[in-house]
Amino acid sequence: MPVSDLADLRGEGWTRLLAAARRKLERSGGLLNGSIGLTGPSEAERRVVIGITGSYRPETVKRLTVELFELDDALSEMYGMGLLKALARLDGPVRDRPAERAAEAGIRDEVLVRAAGATSAAEPWFTPWLDAIAADGTLTRLLRRGDAHLVGWATAVLDRLPVRALPLPVLAEWTTGDTKALVPGSPLAVLVLRALALRSGVPGVPSDRAGQRALWESAGVIVDDLASQVLVLNVRVSGGDVVSGWLNDAADFGIPFRLTLHQQAADPIVPSAQEIFVCENPAVLRAAAADLREGSMPLVCTEGVPSVACQKLLAAAVTAGARLRWRADFDWAGLRIVGAAMARHGAQPWRMAAADYAAGLEEGESVPLTGSPADSPWDPALAGLMSAKAQAVMEERLIGALLTDLA
Protein backbone atom coordinates (compact mmCIF):
# COMPACT_ATOMS: atom_id res chain seq x y z
CA MET A 1 0.00 0.00 0.00
CA PRO A 2 1.50 3.40 -0.95
CA VAL A 3 2.11 5.95 1.76
CA SER A 4 -0.54 8.20 0.21
CA ASP A 5 -3.13 5.63 1.28
CA LEU A 6 -2.18 6.37 4.89
CA ALA A 7 -3.10 10.05 4.54
CA ASP A 8 -5.83 9.75 7.17
CA LEU A 9 -3.18 8.84 9.74
CA ARG A 10 -1.65 12.29 9.34
CA GLY A 11 -4.88 13.94 10.40
CA GLU A 12 -5.58 15.65 13.72
CA GLY A 13 -7.16 12.62 15.33
CA TRP A 14 -4.12 10.39 14.74
CA THR A 15 -1.02 12.62 15.01
CA ARG A 16 -0.56 12.74 18.80
CA LEU A 17 -1.70 9.16 19.22
CA LEU A 18 0.85 7.75 16.78
CA ALA A 19 3.61 9.99 18.16
CA ALA A 20 2.94 8.61 21.64
CA ALA A 21 2.94 5.07 20.25
CA ARG A 22 6.33 5.64 18.55
CA ARG A 23 7.85 6.94 21.79
CA LYS A 24 6.52 3.96 23.73
CA LEU A 25 7.78 1.45 21.17
CA GLU A 26 11.23 3.08 20.99
CA ARG A 27 11.59 2.83 24.76
CA SER A 28 10.52 -0.83 24.81
CA GLY A 29 12.46 -1.98 21.77
CA GLY A 30 9.28 -2.47 19.69
CA LEU A 31 7.22 -4.55 22.16
CA LEU A 32 3.45 -4.14 21.78
CA ASN A 33 2.96 -4.14 25.53
CA GLY A 34 1.33 -1.52 27.69
CA SER A 35 -0.80 1.46 26.81
CA ILE A 36 -0.52 5.06 25.67
CA GLY A 37 -2.58 8.02 26.77
CA LEU A 38 -3.70 11.43 25.54
CA THR A 39 -4.42 14.23 27.99
CA GLY A 40 -6.96 16.88 27.04
CA PRO A 41 -8.07 15.07 23.85
CA SER A 42 -9.69 16.91 20.97
CA GLU A 43 -13.00 15.84 19.48
CA ALA A 44 -11.20 14.23 16.54
CA GLU A 45 -8.94 12.25 18.91
CA ARG A 46 -11.95 11.12 20.95
CA ARG A 47 -13.65 9.77 17.84
CA VAL A 48 -10.50 7.94 16.68
CA VAL A 49 -10.05 6.25 20.05
CA ILE A 50 -13.71 5.22 20.13
CA GLY A 51 -13.24 3.67 16.70
CA ILE A 52 -10.10 1.81 17.79
CA THR A 53 -11.43 0.47 21.09
CA GLY A 54 -15.12 0.11 20.31
CA SER A 55 -15.84 1.77 23.66
CA TYR A 56 -17.74 5.03 23.98
CA ARG A 57 -15.92 7.93 25.63
CA PRO A 58 -17.96 11.00 26.67
CA GLU A 59 -17.13 14.46 25.39
CA THR A 60 -16.12 15.47 28.93
CA VAL A 61 -13.32 12.88 29.14
CA LYS A 62 -9.99 14.37 30.33
CA ARG A 63 -7.71 11.53 29.28
CA LEU A 64 -7.94 8.77 26.70
CA THR A 65 -6.05 5.49 27.03
CA VAL A 66 -5.40 2.93 24.30
CA GLU A 67 -3.63 -0.43 24.57
CA LEU A 68 -0.91 -0.83 21.97
CA PHE A 69 -2.25 -4.19 20.85
CA GLU A 70 -5.63 -2.53 20.21
CA LEU A 71 -4.00 0.12 18.02
CA ASP A 72 -2.05 -2.59 16.22
CA ASP A 73 -5.19 -4.64 15.56
CA ALA A 74 -7.11 -1.59 14.35
CA LEU A 75 -4.43 -0.58 11.85
CA SER A 76 -4.13 -4.14 10.58
CA GLU A 77 -7.85 -4.24 9.94
CA MET A 78 -8.03 -0.76 8.38
CA TYR A 79 -4.83 -0.73 6.29
CA GLY A 80 -3.60 -4.29 6.16
CA MET A 81 -0.46 -3.47 8.19
CA GLY A 82 0.30 -3.39 11.88
CA LEU A 83 1.44 -0.49 14.03
CA LEU A 84 5.19 -0.92 13.50
CA LYS A 85 4.90 -1.12 9.74
CA ALA A 86 2.49 1.82 9.56
CA LEU A 87 4.82 4.00 11.61
CA ALA A 88 7.75 3.00 9.40
CA ARG A 89 5.79 3.90 6.26
CA LEU A 90 4.80 7.27 7.71
CA ASP A 91 8.02 8.56 9.28
CA GLY A 92 10.67 5.87 9.09
CA PRO A 93 11.38 2.74 11.13
CA VAL A 94 10.83 2.74 14.87
CA ARG A 95 14.23 2.97 16.55
CA ASP A 96 15.26 0.33 19.04
CA ARG A 97 16.53 2.61 21.79
CA PRO A 98 17.61 -0.14 24.22
CA ALA A 99 19.66 -1.83 21.49
CA GLU A 100 21.15 1.53 20.46
CA ARG A 101 22.08 2.33 24.04
CA ALA A 102 23.70 -1.07 24.49
CA ALA A 103 25.72 -0.64 21.30
CA GLU A 104 26.64 2.91 22.32
CA ALA A 105 27.79 1.71 25.73
CA GLY A 106 30.00 -0.90 24.08
CA ILE A 107 31.65 1.69 21.83
CA ARG A 108 31.97 4.08 24.75
CA ASP A 109 33.78 1.48 26.86
CA GLU A 110 36.09 0.63 23.97
CA VAL A 111 36.98 4.32 23.46
CA LEU A 112 37.72 4.78 27.16
CA VAL A 113 39.85 1.64 27.34
CA ARG A 114 41.91 2.73 24.33
CA ALA A 115 42.34 6.23 25.75
CA ALA A 116 43.50 4.81 29.08
CA GLY A 117 46.36 3.12 27.22
CA ALA A 118 47.83 6.44 26.10
CA THR A 119 51.34 7.36 27.19
CA SER A 120 50.03 10.51 28.87
CA ALA A 121 47.57 8.45 30.95
CA ALA A 122 50.21 8.36 33.68
CA GLU A 123 49.99 12.14 34.11
CA PRO A 124 47.91 13.33 37.10
CA TRP A 125 45.64 15.48 34.91
CA PHE A 126 44.78 12.76 32.40
CA THR A 127 42.22 10.73 34.39
CA PRO A 128 40.29 13.85 35.54
CA TRP A 129 40.16 14.97 31.89
CA LEU A 130 38.89 11.61 30.65
CA ASP A 131 36.38 11.35 33.49
CA ALA A 132 35.10 14.85 32.77
CA ILE A 133 34.42 14.31 29.06
CA ALA A 134 32.69 11.03 29.91
CA ALA A 135 30.56 12.54 32.70
CA ASP A 136 29.39 15.78 31.08
CA GLY A 137 28.00 14.23 27.89
CA THR A 138 30.89 15.24 25.61
CA LEU A 139 31.80 11.64 24.82
CA THR A 140 28.16 10.70 24.22
CA ARG A 141 27.70 13.58 21.77
CA LEU A 142 30.86 12.57 19.93
CA LEU A 143 29.63 8.98 19.66
CA ARG A 144 26.24 10.00 18.31
CA ARG A 145 27.84 12.28 15.72
CA GLY A 146 30.17 9.52 14.60
CA ASP A 147 33.19 11.40 15.97
CA ALA A 148 34.39 8.93 18.61
CA HIS A 149 37.77 8.78 16.84
CA LEU A 150 38.45 12.33 18.03
CA VAL A 151 39.17 11.02 21.53
CA GLY A 152 41.92 8.84 20.07
CA TRP A 153 43.27 11.77 18.11
CA ALA A 154 43.21 13.92 21.24
CA THR A 155 45.26 11.37 23.18
CA ALA A 156 47.70 11.17 20.26
CA VAL A 157 48.14 14.95 20.43
CA LEU A 158 48.56 14.90 24.20
CA ASP A 159 51.13 12.11 23.97
CA ARG A 160 53.34 14.41 21.85
CA LEU A 161 53.15 17.31 24.30
CA PRO A 162 55.00 19.22 25.56
CA VAL A 163 57.06 20.20 22.53
CA ARG A 164 59.46 23.02 21.80
CA ALA A 165 58.25 25.67 19.37
CA LEU A 166 56.17 23.36 17.16
CA PRO A 167 53.63 25.10 14.87
CA LEU A 168 50.03 24.03 15.48
CA PRO A 169 49.40 22.85 11.87
CA VAL A 170 52.51 20.65 12.06
CA LEU A 171 51.28 19.07 15.30
CA ALA A 172 47.91 18.45 13.66
CA GLU A 173 49.51 16.87 10.60
CA TRP A 174 51.77 14.61 12.65
CA THR A 175 48.93 13.30 14.81
CA THR A 176 45.89 13.28 12.52
CA GLY A 177 47.13 13.70 8.94
CA ASP A 178 45.04 16.89 8.65
CA THR A 179 46.78 20.24 9.12
CA LYS A 180 43.45 21.90 9.97
CA ALA A 181 42.26 19.40 12.58
CA LEU A 182 43.30 21.65 15.46
CA VAL A 183 42.06 25.01 14.17
CA PRO A 184 40.50 27.20 16.89
CA GLY A 185 37.00 26.07 17.82
CA SER A 186 37.27 22.61 16.26
CA PRO A 187 35.98 19.71 18.40
CA LEU A 188 39.47 18.20 18.56
CA ALA A 189 41.05 21.49 19.63
CA VAL A 190 38.46 21.88 22.40
CA LEU A 191 39.17 18.36 23.67
CA VAL A 192 42.92 18.98 23.82
CA LEU A 193 42.55 22.42 25.38
CA ARG A 194 40.41 20.95 28.17
CA ALA A 195 43.29 18.63 29.00
CA LEU A 196 45.86 21.44 28.79
CA ALA A 197 43.73 23.56 31.13
CA LEU A 198 43.86 20.79 33.74
CA ARG A 199 47.58 20.34 33.09
CA SER A 200 48.21 24.04 33.69
CA GLY A 201 45.85 24.37 36.65
CA VAL A 202 43.60 26.76 34.71
CA PRO A 203 39.89 26.70 35.70
CA GLY A 204 38.46 25.69 32.35
CA VAL A 205 39.21 26.56 28.73
CA PRO A 206 39.30 30.35 28.19
CA SER A 207 36.63 31.64 25.84
CA ASP A 208 38.94 34.14 24.16
CA ARG A 209 41.55 33.35 21.52
CA ALA A 210 44.37 34.91 23.54
CA GLY A 211 43.66 32.65 26.51
CA GLN A 212 43.48 29.58 24.30
CA ARG A 213 46.73 30.55 22.58
CA ALA A 214 48.38 30.83 25.99
CA LEU A 215 47.28 27.27 26.80
CA TRP A 216 48.79 25.96 23.57
CA GLU A 217 51.99 27.86 24.25
CA SER A 218 52.17 26.40 27.76
CA ALA A 219 52.79 23.09 25.97
CA GLY A 220 55.25 24.62 23.49
CA VAL A 221 52.83 24.83 20.54
CA ILE A 222 53.02 27.90 18.30
CA VAL A 223 49.60 29.11 17.22
CA ASP A 224 50.82 32.45 15.84
CA ASP A 225 54.47 33.54 15.91
CA LEU A 226 53.41 37.20 15.72
CA ALA A 227 50.99 36.89 18.62
CA SER A 228 53.51 34.99 20.78
CA GLN A 229 55.30 37.75 22.68
CA VAL A 230 57.44 38.39 25.73
CA LEU A 231 57.58 41.64 27.71
CA VAL A 232 61.08 42.73 28.73
CA LEU A 233 62.86 45.59 30.47
CA ASN A 234 66.58 46.39 30.10
CA VAL A 235 67.42 43.10 28.39
CA ARG A 236 70.49 43.92 26.34
CA VAL A 237 71.57 41.58 23.58
CA SER A 238 74.61 40.97 21.42
CA GLY A 239 74.31 41.29 17.69
CA GLY A 240 74.02 44.04 15.12
CA ASP A 241 70.63 43.24 13.58
CA VAL A 242 67.64 45.58 13.68
CA VAL A 243 65.78 43.81 16.50
CA SER A 244 68.91 43.69 18.68
CA GLY A 245 69.30 47.41 18.10
CA TRP A 246 65.71 48.04 19.22
CA LEU A 247 66.23 46.04 22.41
CA ASN A 248 69.47 47.85 23.28
CA ASP A 249 67.98 51.26 22.52
CA ALA A 250 65.01 50.48 24.76
CA ALA A 251 67.38 49.39 27.55
CA ASP A 252 69.33 52.69 27.26
CA PHE A 253 66.21 54.56 28.35
CA GLY A 254 64.57 51.94 30.59
CA ILE A 255 61.64 51.51 28.21
CA PRO A 256 59.63 48.24 28.26
CA PHE A 257 59.77 46.31 24.98
CA ARG A 258 57.60 43.55 23.51
CA LEU A 259 59.58 40.95 21.58
CA THR A 260 57.70 38.54 19.30
CA LEU A 261 58.59 34.99 18.40
CA HIS A 262 58.66 36.07 14.76
CA GLN A 263 61.34 38.66 15.52
CA GLN A 264 63.43 36.05 17.31
CA ALA A 265 63.15 33.73 14.32
CA ALA A 266 64.34 36.41 11.90
CA ASP A 267 67.69 36.88 13.68
CA PRO A 268 69.20 35.10 16.70
CA ILE A 269 68.54 37.12 19.84
CA VAL A 270 71.20 36.39 22.48
CA PRO A 271 70.90 38.25 25.80
CA SER A 272 74.23 39.44 27.13
CA ALA A 273 73.23 39.83 30.81
CA GLN A 274 74.77 37.52 33.38
CA GLU A 275 71.65 37.63 35.55
CA ILE A 276 68.01 38.04 34.49
CA PHE A 277 65.04 38.37 36.83
CA VAL A 278 61.69 36.88 35.79
CA CYS A 279 58.28 37.87 37.15
CA GLU A 280 54.73 36.88 36.28
CA ASN A 281 52.73 40.13 36.37
CA PRO A 282 53.19 43.24 34.18
CA ALA A 283 52.56 45.45 37.24
CA VAL A 284 56.00 44.47 38.57
CA LEU A 285 57.76 45.38 35.33
CA ARG A 286 55.74 48.59 35.04
CA ALA A 287 56.81 49.62 38.55
CA ALA A 288 60.45 48.85 37.77
CA ALA A 289 60.28 50.93 34.59
CA ALA A 290 58.66 53.84 36.45
CA ASP A 291 60.89 53.84 39.55
CA LEU A 292 64.20 52.46 38.33
CA ARG A 293 64.12 53.07 34.56
CA GLU A 294 67.49 52.15 33.00
CA GLY A 295 68.82 51.40 36.50
CA SER A 296 66.74 48.24 36.85
CA MET A 297 68.28 44.81 36.54
CA PRO A 298 67.22 42.97 33.35
CA LEU A 299 63.62 41.85 33.87
CA VAL A 300 61.40 39.53 31.85
CA CYS A 301 57.65 39.27 32.48
CA THR A 302 55.91 36.01 31.58
CA GLU A 303 52.37 37.45 31.90
CA GLY A 304 51.14 34.15 33.27
CA VAL A 305 52.28 30.86 31.78
CA PRO A 306 55.41 31.62 29.71
CA SER A 307 54.81 31.94 25.98
CA VAL A 308 56.94 30.20 23.38
CA ALA A 309 58.55 33.57 22.70
CA CYS A 310 59.44 33.88 26.40
CA GLN A 311 60.83 30.35 26.61
CA LYS A 312 62.94 30.87 23.50
CA LEU A 313 64.45 34.12 24.78
CA LEU A 314 65.29 32.72 28.20
CA ALA A 315 66.69 29.50 26.77
CA ALA A 316 69.03 31.61 24.62
CA ALA A 317 70.04 33.58 27.72
CA VAL A 318 70.86 30.44 29.70
CA THR A 319 72.84 29.01 26.79
CA ALA A 320 74.85 32.24 26.74
CA GLY A 321 75.64 31.83 30.45
CA ALA A 322 72.93 33.86 32.18
CA ARG A 323 71.43 32.93 35.56
CA LEU A 324 67.66 33.22 35.89
CA ARG A 325 65.96 34.28 39.11
CA TRP A 326 62.31 33.40 38.70
CA ARG A 327 59.13 34.07 40.62
CA ALA A 328 55.35 34.02 40.13
CA ASP A 329 52.18 34.52 42.16
CA PHE A 330 51.78 32.53 45.33
CA ASP A 331 49.02 30.33 43.93
CA TRP A 332 49.04 26.77 42.63
CA ALA A 333 49.60 27.85 39.04
CA GLY A 334 52.51 30.01 40.21
CA LEU A 335 54.18 27.07 41.94
CA ARG A 336 53.85 25.04 38.75
CA ILE A 337 55.36 27.86 36.69
CA VAL A 338 58.40 28.17 38.95
CA GLY A 339 58.86 24.41 39.22
CA ALA A 340 58.77 24.08 35.44
CA ALA A 341 61.30 26.94 35.06
CA MET A 342 63.70 25.22 37.44
CA ALA A 343 63.39 21.95 35.53
CA ARG A 344 63.68 23.49 32.08
CA HIS A 345 66.13 26.38 32.56
CA GLY A 346 67.85 25.65 35.87
CA ALA A 347 66.25 28.82 37.26
CA GLN A 348 66.59 29.82 40.91
CA PRO A 349 63.46 30.84 42.86
CA TRP A 350 63.24 34.58 43.54
CA ARG A 351 61.48 35.45 46.80
CA MET A 352 59.39 32.28 46.49
CA ALA A 353 59.97 30.88 50.01
CA ALA A 354 57.47 30.20 52.78
CA ALA A 355 58.77 33.28 54.63
CA ASP A 356 57.99 35.49 51.61
CA TYR A 357 54.48 34.07 51.40
CA ALA A 358 53.93 34.60 55.12
CA ALA A 359 55.12 38.19 54.83
CA GLY A 360 52.64 38.78 52.03
CA LEU A 361 49.79 37.38 54.12
CA GLU A 362 50.57 39.82 56.91
CA GLU A 363 49.73 42.69 54.56
CA GLY A 364 46.02 41.79 54.61
CA GLU A 365 43.34 39.45 53.31
CA SER A 366 43.75 37.91 49.87
CA VAL A 367 41.76 35.85 47.40
CA PRO A 368 41.12 32.16 48.15
CA LEU A 369 43.36 29.52 46.61
CA THR A 370 41.63 27.61 43.82
CA GLY A 371 42.53 24.71 41.56
CA SER A 372 44.59 21.59 42.13
CA PRO A 373 47.40 21.88 44.71
CA ALA A 374 51.02 21.85 43.52
CA ASP A 375 54.36 21.08 45.15
CA SER A 376 57.21 23.47 45.96
CA PRO A 377 60.27 21.18 45.95
CA TRP A 378 62.65 24.16 46.44
CA ASP A 379 60.88 24.88 49.77
CA PRO A 380 58.40 22.14 50.79
CA ALA A 381 57.18 24.30 53.67
CA LEU A 382 55.76 26.78 51.16
CA ALA A 383 53.18 24.43 49.64
CA GLY A 384 52.25 23.20 53.11
CA LEU A 385 51.70 26.72 54.41
CA MET A 386 49.66 27.67 51.36
CA SER A 387 47.43 24.64 51.87
CA ALA A 388 46.95 25.55 55.52
CA LYS A 389 46.16 29.23 54.87
CA ALA A 390 44.16 28.58 51.66
CA GLN A 391 44.91 32.09 50.39
CA ALA A 392 46.77 33.29 47.33
CA VAL A 393 49.24 36.18 47.46
CA MET A 394 49.76 38.06 44.21
CA GLU A 395 53.11 39.52 43.18
CA GLU A 396 51.81 43.07 43.39
CA ARG A 397 51.82 42.79 47.20
CA LEU A 398 55.60 42.25 47.14
CA ILE A 399 56.52 45.04 44.72
CA GLY A 400 58.48 47.02 47.33
CA ALA A 401 60.80 44.10 48.10
CA LEU A 402 61.08 43.16 44.44
CA LEU A 403 62.15 46.65 43.42
CA THR A 404 64.84 46.52 46.10
CA ASP A 405 66.26 43.42 44.44
CA LEU A 406 65.98 44.93 40.96
CA ALA A 407 67.83 48.09 41.94
Image: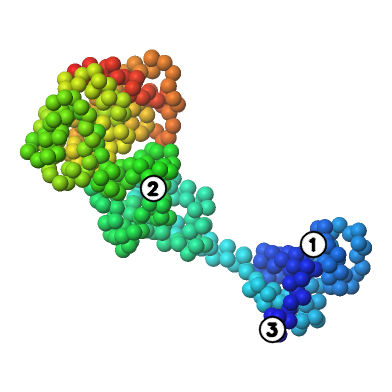
**Looking at the figure, which quarter contains the N terminus?**
bottom right
Distance from the alpha carbon under mark 2 to that under mark 1: 47 Å
Identify the residue position indicated by label 3 in the image. Answer: 2
> Are the two marked residues, 3 and 1, in contact with CB atoms closer than 8 angstroms?
no
Q: Is residue 58 above or below residue 304?
A: below
Q: Is residue 30 left or right of residue 167?
A: right
Distance from the alpha carbon under mark 3 to that under mark 1: 28 Å
Q: How many marks?
A: 3
Which numbered tag is attached to residue 193?
A: 2
**Looking at the figure, which quarter contains the C terminus?**
top left
Q: Is residue 263 above or below residue 169?
A: above
Q: Is residue 110 left or right of residue 70?
A: left
Residue pictured at 27% horizontal, 25% vertical: 286
x, y (%) of residue 38? Answer: 80, 61
Residue 365 visible in the picture: yes
x, y (%) of residue 51? Answer: 86, 73
Which numbered tag is attached to residue 332?
A: none
Distance from the alpha carbon under mark 2 to that under mark 3: 52 Å
Q: Amino acid at mark 1?
A: Gly
> Are the two marked residues, 2 and 3, in contact with CB atoms closer than 8 angstroms?
no
Which numbered tag is attached to residue 37?
A: 1
Q: Amino acid at mark 3?
A: Pro
x, y (%) of residue 126? Answer: 39, 47
Residue most extreme to the top: 362
Disc 3 is placed on an element classified as loop
> Are the two marked residues, 2 and 1, in contact with CB atoms closer than 8 angstroms?
no
x, y (%) of residue 231? Answer: 24, 33
